[in-house]
Amino acid sequence: MQVLFVMVAGRRFALDSSEISEVLPVVEHRSAGTGPSWLLGLINVRGALLPLVDLSVIVASTSTELRLGSRIIVLQLESELLDFVGANASGSKVGLLVPEVLGLGDRDFSQGGAHTGFNFAGAPHLGPTIADTEGFVQLLRCRRILEGDAALRELPRAAQ
Amino acid sequence: MAASVAFHRSLLGRSMLLGVLPASLVVLLIVVINGLRAWSEIATTLEGDLNAAVELAAGEIDAANKRSLAQAQLMALAQESGMFGRRAETLMFIEKVLRANPELHAAYVAYEPNGDGNDALGAQAGVPTVALTASGRFYPYFKRDPKSATGFTLEVLQETENAGGLWYDFPKERFERSGVSTPLITKPYDYFGQAIIENVTPLVIKGRFQGVAGVDVSLESIQARLAQLSVQLNADIFLDARGSFVAATTDSTAGTQLRTTAVEKSDLAEVFAGVPKKGIRLENSIDRQSGAECYFVSTMIPTGEWRLVVRKPTSAVLASLSDLFLVNLGTAAIGIAIIVTLLALNAVSSGRRVRAAQSAAERISSGDLSQRVAVMSGSDESADLVRAMARMNDELATIVGSVRSASVRLAATSVELAATSREQGATASTFGGSTAQMAAAIREISATGAELLRTVETVDAGARRSAESATAGRANLDRMAQSMARLERGSDEVSDRLQVISEKAELITSVVVTITKVAEQTNLLSVNAAIEAEKAGDAGLGFLVVAREIRRLADQTAAATLDIERIVRHMQEAVSSGVGDMARFAGEMRGSTVGVQRLTTSLGNIIDEMNSAARGFSDVQTGMANQSAGVTQIELAVRQVAEGAQQTSQSASEFSNVAEDLAHSVAVLQDAVGRFTVAPTASEQR
C-alpha cells in the first residue's frame, strides 16, 4: 500500500495514505489555552476550523520542534468518543502536526518478515513494524491516535 | 470448405482420364487387330479344310460309283466275250461277282426277248425257272438275302412302277440313239421296299443291243458312308443323285424330309443350281432352312453326274475364333480393372491428404488458428504437405499469441505515457514563467554592474592622470588638489553604486526565497496529488506517475535555487569587499586633501599616495570584474533553467504525440491480431 513516511523523535513511522485527507504546510494556530498537552489549538484550513494535535506528544511525549520539513496532516478521526475536540463542518477531522514528512512510498506491512507490533492495550495506534533499506519503520494507525493511554490520561474525567 | 472438384478435374478423375483411358484404348486396339488377323487366317484355313474335305468326300463317292460301274461293265464284257446265250454259266458268274463285291446289294443280267434264241428251251440244268419270265426270257436277279442258306436269293427281274424303264429301256434308247455303249447310273428308286441305285451297262453283241448287265447299290450303304463323313467333318452333307436327295445331316428329321423332296423344290435348290461342272465352289450365304449364316461347299461327282454339297454353319467355324477373342478381351479387361483399382486407391488416399491440407490452409487464411491440423500417416509428397501445414499452423498460433499479449501491454503503457507527458508539459510551462521573472532581475543587476565598471574606469583614468601630473611637476599642486576633490567625489559615487548593487543582490535573494517556497509548495502539492491518486485506485495510476514527476521537478528547482543562493552570496561578499576598499581609499583621499594644503612639501609622499590609490583602483576593478563574472554565471544558469523548462515542455508535447501514435499503432496491431483466433495457451488456461 502507499504510505507517507514521517520522522517523529528520530523514529520513522508510516501512515496509510488512504487514511490521509491532505498534507498542509505549517500554518498559524490559535492556542487552546488549556486542556491536554497534545491539543495545540485550532487551525484554519480554507475556512474550516480544525483542532490541531501534536503527534510528537502522543508518540514520544515531547512537543514538536518546528523545522523546514514540518507539516500538518489532515485526517478523519475514527473515534466517536472524542467529542471534546469540538465539532466542525468537516465532522471529526483534525490536523496532526508532525516534525518532518519524509515522502511517499509503497510498503507491505503484512509481508512475511513483519513484526506484528507490540500490541499493548494502551497503544492501539501502533501497528506492525518492518525493516527496509532505510531502517525500521512502524505503521501508525493515525485515525486511532487519540484512543491510546498517552492521549486519554490527560483528558478530563467527564470525557473519559 | 472447398467447393467439390468436378470429377474430371479431380486426382482420381485425372488418373482415370490420363492413365486408364489410353491404356484401355491401346489394349482394345491390340485385341481387335489380333482378332481380325486371327479371323482372316483361321477363316482361310477353315475354308481350305472344308474344300479338302469336300474333295475327299466327292472322291470317295466317285470311287465307289466307279467300282460298282466296273462290276456292271465286267459282266457286260463277259457276255460280249462269248458268255451271251450260255445261261447257266452266266448265272454262276453273276453269283460270283456278287460274292466278290460285298458293297453290292444285287447283280443281274437281262436279255432281249429271245435275244439268244434260247427262250423256247425253258428251264434246264443250271437255269431254274425263277431266272426266266413266263415267255422264257432270261431275266435273273441275284440279291443278298440274310434268310437264305447261301446268303443269296435268285429271282426274276420285275418292272416296278417308279422305275419306269429306268434300268432297261433308258440304256437301250441311249445306245440306239448314239450307237455307243455307255454305262450309266440310275437315280435312286424303290425296288420292292429297297431304295437302290443301279449301275447299268448295255450288252452289245455284233453291234446290236441284246440286253443289259447291272449291279444294284443300296442307298442305305451310301447313306451310311455319308453319315460317317458327316460326323468326321462335323457338317451336313447333301448329295443330289440325279434330282433325288441323299442327305446326311446332324438333324435327322431334316434328312428324312429332304429325301422325299425334289431338289428343285427344296431350300437348297439355289445352291445346287450353282454347282460347277469342274472344281469346287465355296460360298457363304444365309441358309434358308435354319436362317443362320453358313458355308456351302459344292462340287460335281463325275461318275454318275451327282452333285455334292457340304453345309457348315459359320458360327461353328468361327466358334473357336470368337472363343480366342473372348479370352483376349477378358484378360485385357481384368488387367485394366487391376490398373483402375490401384490408381483409384492411390488417387483417393492422395486426394484425401490434399483435401486435408486445403481445408487447413483455408482455416488459417480465415484467421482460425485454434484447431490443430491432424497429421496423417504416409510418406509421399501429399503427406509431407499435410505435416508442413500442421507445423505452420502451430508456429503461427504461437506468434499471434505472443503479438497479442505484447500489444495489450503496449496499449496500457501508451495510454499511461500520453497522460504523463501532458501533465509534465503543463508543469514545465508554469516553471518557465518563474524563470522569466528571475531572468529580468538578473539583467537589471548586470546593467548596474556594467555602469559601475565604467565609472571605476573613469576614476582610474583620473587617478593616473593625477599621478602623472604630480610626477610631471609640483607646480601643478593646485590642479592636483582639484583632481583630489574630483577623486573624492568619484569615490563617493563608487560607494553609492556599490550600495545599489548590494540592494539588488538583496532583491535576488528575496526572489530566490520565493522560488524556494514555490518549490516547497509544489512538493507538498505532489504529495497530496499522490494521496488523492491512491484513493482513486486504478484510475489514479497515471495521475500518480504525474505527481511523482512534479515532485522530481520541484526537487530540481530547489537544487537550482540553492545554486543561485550560493552565487548571490559570493557576489555580496565581493561587493562588501569593494565597499571596504572604497571606504579606506576615501579616508586616505580625505587625509591627502588636507595634507595638500598643509604639507606641500610632501609631494613625494603624495606621489606615493597616488601610486597607492592607483593600486586601490586596480583592486576595485578586480572586484568589479569578479562581480560581473558572477552575474554572467547567474544569467547563464537562469537561461539554462529556462531552456530546460522549454525543452521539457517541448519534449512533453512531442512525447505526448508519440504516445498517441503508439496507442493508435497498438490499436491497429490489436485489430490485425484480432482476426486470428488462437487456442488458449497453457499459461492462459492456468
Image (tube, rainbow, N blue to C red):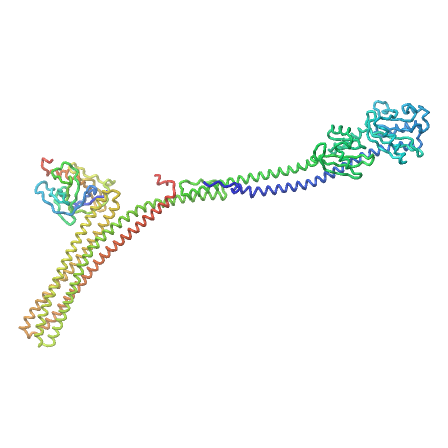
Residue found at the very far left of the displayed protein: B598
Expressed as whole percent of the image width and height from the top left, the position of residue B594 reads 5, 70
Left or right: where B108 falls relative to A3: right
Expressed as whole percent of the image width and height from the top left, the position of residue B524 reads 19, 48
Q: Is residue B169 above or below residue B585?
A: above
Rendered-image quadrant of the N terminus of chain B: top left
- Quarter of the image holding residue A38? top left
- Quarter of the image holding residue B670? top left
- Quarter of the image holding residue B316? top right
Residue found at the very far front of the displayed protein: B265
Q: Residue at x 14, y 57 (%)?
A: B507
Q: Is residue B288 above or below residue B560?
A: above
Rendered-image quadrant of the C terminus of chain B: top left
Q: Is residue B585 above or below residue B298?
A: below
Viewer-side residue, B96 vs B621: B96
Expressed as whole percent of the image width and height from the top left, the position of residue B322 reads 66, 37
Number of labels in the image equals: 0
Q: Is residue B541 visible?
A: yes
Viewer-side residue, B250 vs B260: B260
Expressed as whole percent of the image width and height from the top left, the position of residue B156 reads 88, 25
Q: Is residue A53 visible?
A: no
Left or right: where B528 falls relative to B81: left
